[in-house]
Image (cartoon, rainbow, N blue to C red):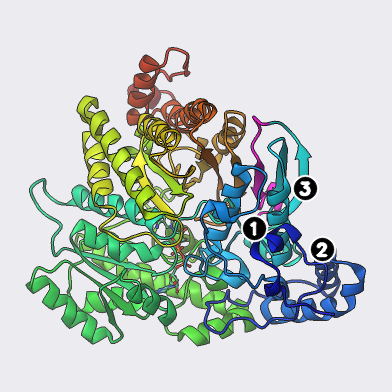
Amino acid sequence: MQTNSVQVDFKSQIIQGIPNEMPRKKERSLSLSHAPKRKEILSMDEKKLAIRNALRYFPKTWHSELSKEFALELNDYGRIYMYRFKPDYDIYARPIVAYPAKTLQAASIILMIQNNLDPAVAQHPEELITYGGNGAVFQNWAQYLLTLKYLATMTDEQTLHIYSGHPMGLFPSSKEAPRVVVTNGMMIPNYSKPDDWEKYNALGVTQYGQMTAGSYMYIGPQGIVHGTAITVMNAFRNVLNKDESSNWKIFLTAGLGGMSGAQPKAGNIAGCITICAEVNPTAAHKRHAQGWVDELIEDINVLVSRTQKAIADKEVVSLAFVGNVVDVWEKFDEEGLFIHLGSDQTSLHNPWAGGYYPVGLSFEEANDMMSGNPEAFKEKVQESLRRQVTAINKHTARGTYFFDYGNAFLLEASRAGADVMAENNIDFRYPSYVQDILGPMCFDYGFGPFRWVCTSGKTEDLQITDGIALKVMEQIKTEAPEEIQQQMQDNITWIREAEQNKLVVGSKARILYADAEGRAKIAEAFNHAIHSGEISAPVVLGRDHHDVSGTDSPFRETSNIYDGSKFTADMAIHNVIGDSFRGATWVSIHNGGGVGWGEVINGGFGIVLDGSEDATRRLKSMLFYDVNNGISRRSWARNEEALFAIKREMERTPELKVTLPNLVDDELLNNLFY
Ligand SMILES: NC(=O)c1ccc[n+]([C@@H]2O[C@H](COP(=O)([O-])OP(=O)(O)OC[C@H]3O[C@@H](n4cnc5c(N)ncnc54)[C@H](O)[C@@H]3O)[C@@H](O)[C@H]2O)c1
């Protein structure tokens, strides 16, 4: 007999995990966005293995019916999502008291997982994808059900180990240990090519966790708006004279997806004219309806005249062009429209499976070709990238400042044979935003995307935390050295205006770029406020993996490391191990994220503040290490700003002893080899 599980209450459904009786078959929602069909990659034998793997979650008596259904899913979508097992209850971050759990820590993790899968937050919620086209929380709904059951029933002397979405199980540990340890996409290095992800993900044995998708720390595009606003503001500071304003200057880019959707809002905060092309009409309309972009324009000639009007009227406005970005670069060149800043946030970390749409094909044509004729599609993508770069080069020859937005644009363009290499044929001719902007101005000083979530779900709690963070930052700024005054001011302005920017989607969360001192002082003040009852429920702290620490990514986070070590991943591993025994509630380490499978190792953490003295001890120890590990690595690579920051930290903290580099004179080296 098949049951309709809606009759069982929410808490019981969570505790039940995989239901005792097979739920009824479900169709996919027509109103939600779905992951593109993944390319056919498995042999006949491998397809059988994928079904065998999927069926191991279920009793034998269900196998006959489920095997046929899963084979159809594999055939139709290239993956087995197990749609039938998606629960009937609504998935979103409920107030923490709504969750069944024996520990507050585990309840907080359930809340964070549900936020990552909330249809208002997630990109393809029914495929358990939070953002970036393939950034998965779980591979299938059985993993989701089992994980939540484990979390709801575990004690604070157990640790749940999760292998790429699959909950391997609860193991005895201690109160001091993390409640959850997550790995995503960890592969034997030689098996880390894009097609390896296609194959092993289709087999159901690994997943692409992106950064905050597979670590349950995504907080919607707000998390990105702050970083993007900092980037756009500082990019303008880099190219304009000191007294020149960014008002009515043009910022041209692409993408209105999960993270890229933050660009127009960031452009408005930076006070410029943003032109953002988005080829997927659903994504463009969604962002417009959410108020993230001011106007939608479908005709390229209308875009040109509207841009000219915005310049003439000195407007601060964001315009979404519903179409291909290559057309905009080319058209603006023909029309002689000067672009001050240029970038691109298509998902080129995932170029062959829906991350980048080639010019000249409609959105539907591209989707058909992607799965029907992947080789031809690949050629189209590469041809399109060559055309895009040719147009960009014409603009930069006239003075446009172009930067790579960490989406592997330059990497994939170079692989496509586009003219993006510098004269030395080693470097790219354009910088990444981390090399020129975020690295030296933020990461090397320890500033990064610290974030928190109020588990009460109450707006008032978020307002109180905003107020506390503002007070702490203002206090720190009074004694901060000249080198970081600008950063402190940008962050103070952000937190002061954060509420009026109306950026909260999903959980009651906030992001704030802060350094080690700021993060620890803000966290400690939150913990006091929870203890005193001023904040009504625990607060979860975390960060984006896109930070000073935690992520080794030679074309992004660590692209401004010049001692050769940017192709190593020791820092990310040290972060996750170091955080795990210093008090993190959960830790995660991922292959892929941002720039692509095999191109980056990144990790993060979550820590629950419950107002206890124990939480104060943990937060101080863990946040200190989490940030300063990255600064140490950056200072050993001779980054001037990081050397400044770590020396300052050593003065403040006598127990910290970091190995410092001796600098070598260029002249000495220049005469060594002939
Ligand atoms: N925002 C940030 O701070 C940040 C930082 C680092 C890296 N990134 C990178 O930016 C990329 C985008 O992330 P996302 O979460 O928005 O991904 P996403 O897949 O949700 O969005 C990308 C969007 O680009 C659109 N697109 C693809 N090709 C296009 C084309 N030729 N013309 C116009 N639109 C096109 C897609 O339709 C999609 O909506 C990722 O590679 C990510 O890693 C972002």
Q: Nearer the viewer, residue 353 or 467?
A: 467
**For mark 1, what is the residue?**
193
As measured in the structure, the alpha-carbon distance from the residue carrying label 3 to the one carrying label 1 is 28 Å
SS of the residue at dot 3?
strand
Q: Nearer the viewer, residue 527 or 497?
A: 527
Q: Are marks 3 and 1 in contact (CB under 8 Å)?
A: no
Q: Which is more N-terminal, label 2 or label 3? A: 2
Q: Amino acid at mark 2?
A: Tyr
Of the residues shown, which amino acid type is indicated by label 1?
A: Lys
Q: Write down the region rendered in magenta.
A: 175-193
Ligand 1 - quadrant of the structure image = bottom left
Q: Residue at x 22, y 79 (%)?
A: 334
Q: CA distance from mark 1 to mark 2?
A: 28 Å
Q: Quadrant of the N terminus?
A: bottom right
Q: Nearer the viewer, residue 638 or 72?
A: 72
In the image: residue 635, left or right of residue 372: left
Q: Is residue 190 magenta?
A: yes
Residue 326 is a magenta residue? no
- Residue, disc 2: 57
Amino acid identity at mark 3: Gly
| x 45%, y 42%: residue | 558
Query: Mark 3 highlights which residue?
Result: 169
Q: Label 3 neighbourhood size at 10 Å, few (<14), some (14-19), many (20+)?
A: some
The secondary structure type at the circle numbered 1 is loop
